[in-house]
Image (cartoon, grey):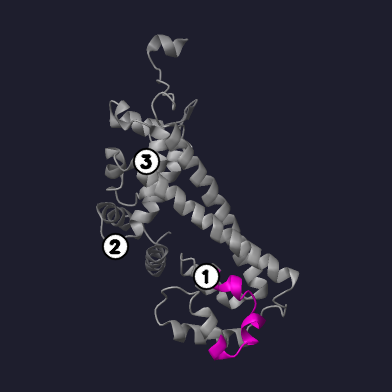
Amino acid sequence: MYLLESGITQIYHDPSAHGINDIQELANTYSVIAYRRTQILHSLKNHYIALYFPEIEKYLLSTKALWFTQTFRRFPTPRSISRLSESRFIKIATPLVGRKPNKPLWLKELYATAHRSIGLPVEEKSIAAKMFVLMLSEYERLTHIRAEIQETADSVLCDNPDYELLQSIPGVGPVIALAILAEVGDMRRFKHHKQFLKFCGFDLATHQAGKYQSKSSLSKRGNARLRLVFWQAAQIAIQQQENSFRKKYTRYIKCIPTRQTIDVKLESLWQQNLPV
């Protein structure tokens, strides 16, 4: 009641009334599918590939294409490759690897790798190999679903000016822009940028107990998912070569002493017999 009397209130925006219910469902479904796909990926790397064909993990880490699942669903174990002649294997595998550059050389390398693999010697028709193929199929299926959701989101938001404007921010792509719009709705409902920062939990707060007063830090009392997607955008932005955020980040970390700098200063003080 005191907050209401003081005018410290926040207007509730009904998703159905404000036309963002579909956007929220797209974002939520994408999040669930992406999380499940990541679980499958970790299971493939840490269990199936590690046991039955450990040498192919480097190909899984270096690509997002579907040629990986298509190829190794057909050849899930080293024996499924080594039992064939090199020419026969290359002939069968060539259509599976898609547009991979220098295809024959890569397939020859894979054929040689299968012969010296340290994976468990299981047969292609064994239950273990079938479970490996099943997980690869599930990973491929989730990848297709994720791509379909992205296409649907692009078609729904293609006329939304905020969707295009958000993607002009370094690190913000279609998926992050979708998540921001799903959580915020109409971004123009905030009269000041500080209101939006508070909505996200990016405003500064100071904790006080008696005579103790902490340093100002992020309150983290707003929308946790918005903080997550902005953190993801920042991680992407600082990895890019040229953008305003990368330059600002570089200037910021220059002020932070590295471990090597600290060691040099300590050694200098020790040589001068000064207190550390």
Q: Which mark lies nearer to you, 3 or 2?
A: 3
Seen in the picture, residue 225 relative to 48 is either above or below; the reply is above
Q: Nearer the viewer, residue 243 or 180?
A: 180
Q: Amino acid at mark 3?
A: Val
Mark 3 vs mark 2: which is more N-terminal?
3
- Circle nearer the viewer, 1 or 2: 1
Which residue is drawn at the image coordinates 29% and 40% (left, top)? Answer: 159
Residue type at mark 2? Gln
Check disc 1 and report its element: helix, strand or loop: helix
Quadrant of the image occupied by residue 161: top left
- Per the picture, the main secondary structure of the magenta-coloured stretch is helix
- The image position of residue 162, as x and y in percent, is 29, 38
How far across and how far down the image is residue 69, in percent?
55, 68
Circles 3, 2 touching at the beta carbon (< 8 Å):
no
Identity of the residue furthest to the right in this view: 127
Q: Are marks 1 and 2 in contact (CB under 8 Å)?
A: no
Q: In the structure shown, which secondary structural element does the residue marked by tag 3 occupy?
A: helix
Q: Label 3, label 1: how many angstroms apart (C-alpha)?
A: 31 Å
> In the rendered image, which residue does mark 1 sit on?
68
For disc 2, the marked residue is: 241
Q: Which residues are magenta?
A: 70-88
- On-image quarter of the C terminus: bottom left
Q: Nearer the viewer, residue 244 or 143?
A: 143
Q: CA distance from mark 3 to mark 2?
A: 31 Å
> Looking at numbered disc 1 in the image, what kind of residue is underneath it?
Phe
Residue matched to label 3: 156
| Residue shown at 41% from the left, 9% from the top | 5
Q: CA distance from mark 1 to mark 2?
A: 28 Å
Q: Is residue 103 magenta?
A: no
Q: Nearer the viewer, residue 36 or 67?
A: 67
The disc label shown at residue 77, or none = none
Q: Is residue 116 visible?
A: no
